[in-house]
Amino acid sequence: MYAFIDNNIFVNLNYKFDTGDLKELKTYINNNLVQLIITPVSNAELRKHYEKRVTQSILNKYIGLLKAFEEFNIPYLTDLTEDEIKRKLTNPLEQFLATPTNISLDISRLNIEALIDDYHHGRLPFEASKEDEFKDAINVQLLKRYQESKDETIYIISDDKGFNKAFEDNEGNKFKIYKSLNEFNTHLREYEANYKMIGYAIERHFGLPEFCDEVYNYLSNPKAYLYYDDRITLVDILKVNFKTPQYAITELTDNQCHGTIYLTGKCLVKYINSTDIHAFDIDESVSQDLLINGKIRFHTSVPFEIEYHRKEYNDNDVATNWLIDNFIINWSDLQIKLSQNDIHAISIDLEGSINLL
């Protein structure tokens, strides 16, 4: 089985190769269930974005911390040079790219004349709004040429609509598209019997009322939400709606399972934020401590571990032979990070604001 993962998928997963969906994928790669296809463009793009979003970002924070320690004469224990730290930070990426079963496509396979012709005639992935998408066009052409040489389905994992459209018009299932790695892992899970069976048990647990109540209670805690602006204070979570959780299985032994739960949903909230007051034509002099009714969108993850056992084998009811004895969610790790686009003001809570005075 062959798969190509677009860079936007790695961005969505914050390049966390040793947890969640990426770690589950590595299990299937190590079990020779799937081989990743790496193009020169995807290799370069992955390295470029990883350098900016992970290596340089963490390194800047680390250097800033060391400077603060020096300023206040606080001793710190590290003999690592900046280059050594960078090597440690990039090691997860390098190991992922160096996976022995990866297939690296050579740029010499590229037909430049065909690429220019596609650009001239506006063929996908060249769109009206993305006319400079040469990097996508290179990936598309290389993948199509490789598929022709293998005559097997290639799985495309990408949430880029324009990129995906370039593979939709194909005969005989040459390409199959998944919009998330979690969705693709669910497909792969069907080929690994033990992962499939524990997956069924996890999904049954998700349907239990007590599980839903547990999730609701923790998502209703304002302290779990971290906002981008410290001038914003969540006062109350009025209502939480969350979708059926998705999950990744990161480790599976004879009686234990470790993984990650992905939680997505919306909340109705009350919060304080003077910067939002201007949208309601409220005088700046009375903008302090006014309550705002709003809604929040969230997408977060939290680790879990399971203890389970198997009943005596029964051909007629295999899936229910995997029984969960203990399902532990590490809620202490719950941090729902919110960006500016995740919270939206609805109205002023005048009565609540008066009570604050």
Image (cartoon, rainbow, N blue to C red):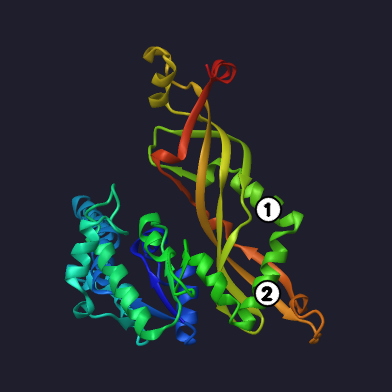
Residue 247 location (% of width, % of height): 57, 64
Q: Which residue is mark 2?
A: 307
Name the one closer to the observer, 243 or 155: 155
Name the one closer to the observer, 341 or 9: 9
Residue 46 location (% of width, % of height): 28, 67
Q: Against 278, is 341 above or below?
A: below
**Disc on res. 214:** 1
Which amino acid, by three-letter code, is at mark 1? Glu
Residue 183 location (% of width, % of height): 53, 65
Which amino acid, by three-letter code, is at mark 2? Glu
Q: Against 88, is 227 above or below?
A: above
Residue 312 location (% of width, % of height): 80, 86
With 351 as the anchor, is 341 left or right in this view? Answer: left
Name the one closer to the observer, 63 or 112: 112
What secondary structure is found at the residue carrying circle 1?
A: helix
Question: What residue is drawn where x is 22% and y is 59%?
Answer: 119
CA separation, marks 2 and 1?
18 Å
